[in-house]
Amino acid sequence: MISDADEDILTFDVRRRRFLQIVTGVLAIPVVSGNVRAQDYPTRPITIVVPGAPASAIDTLARFIVERTRASLGQPIIVENIVGAGGSIGVGRVAHAAPDGYTLVIGTWGTHVVNGAVYALSYDVLNDFEPVALLTDNSQLIVGAKTLPTNNLQGLIAWLKANPEKVFAGTAGVGSPQHMFGILFQNATGTRFQFVHYGSSPQAMEDLLAGRIQIMIADQVTALPEVHEDNIKAYAFTGRSRLPTAPSVPTTDEAGLPGFHTSVWVGVWAPKGTPKPVIARLNTAVTDALDDETARRLAALGQQVVPREQQSSESLRILQKHEIEKWWPIIKVAGIKAD
């Protein structure tokens, strides 16, 4: 016979097991649901934020990628241009978006490295995002006015040292890539020259052609047409290998300034916490879009598609971290802040 005490114990044990089963089932629901969402992704339109104006370089690149990823993802991709504060407003929108893979941002060295040092942001440029893929590299050309008395990089450096603070270098504005790269060049060579800040690279190039400024570390789109027309001198390319569209221009390594590499690279990010299977799905779609035809078309716009082995989300994470460690101290010492 079972005593009343034993019966109470058995009843408690049954209830306890039922409670544990219910709790275990409830705890398992989010995991299962998360896996299902990742497997089914995407089931609705995706928005990719472009922190630049329509028809800008970053916007053009985004639309190239979108055009070639729509079919593989099977959903519309909406391009949303959000400008302002060096792109930090658009990037911030994605930082605070739901981590479900339906809001992405295409960003650059400027938005995901420099902005973290020059703006008071409501987000962390490194830790509040999940990297999706590294897309392109846009290294620069060190160029000078046609009237300069030297034809190679070592001669240019020697001439700058002989004329401290007498030479003018053009930029697209305070904190622009040309400004940052010019500061790095001064640090690397021990030279000193004055910066002249314009509203855009083409404006600076106009004054370089006119001889009102003497040097510039210029993007390919701005500089290459003038190099090909022999209107300016090209001293070196800041990439690690020669530029296919200007094969006669040596790299900085070849020209006697080893290790001086600059790039306004471009990548895609999702909000922090986006499921890994969703990131993997997006990475596959994006990297498949970076085929030979896309590479040829982007090269004409001064964007070099990075090698396939560098297109992974982890490659983008490592590059961004390295660039932050490299540039933030330089920016701090230079005292550059957003207006």
Image (cartoon, helix red, strand yellow):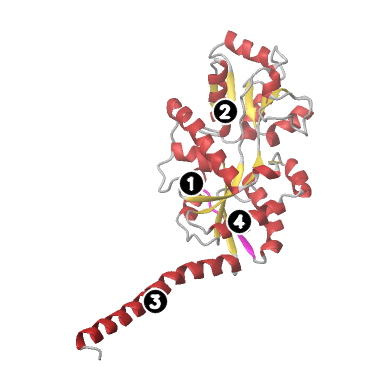
Which mark is drawn over residue 88?
A: 1
Residue topped by disc 2: 181
Q: Nearer the viewer, residue 299 or 211?
A: 299
* Quadrant including the N terminus: bottom left
Q: Which amino acid does label 3 sit on?
A: Gln
Spatial separation of the CA atoms under disc 3 and disc 2: 61 Å
Question: Can you identify the residue that label 4 sits on?
Answer: 280
Q: Is mark 2 on a helix, strand or loop?
A: helix
Q: Residue at x 63, y 25 (%)?
A: 216
320 over 91 or under it: above or below:
above
Q: Mark 3 points at which residue?
A: 21
The image position of residue 78, as x and y in percent, is 61, 61
Compute the Cα span from label 1 to label 3: 47 Å
What's drawn in magenta, residue-wise? 76-84
Tell me, yes or no, whether the highlighted magenta stretch contains residue 193: no
Gap in angstroms between the C-alphas marked 4 and 1 = 26 Å
Secondary structure found at label 4: helix
Q: Which of marks 3 and 2 is in front?
A: 3
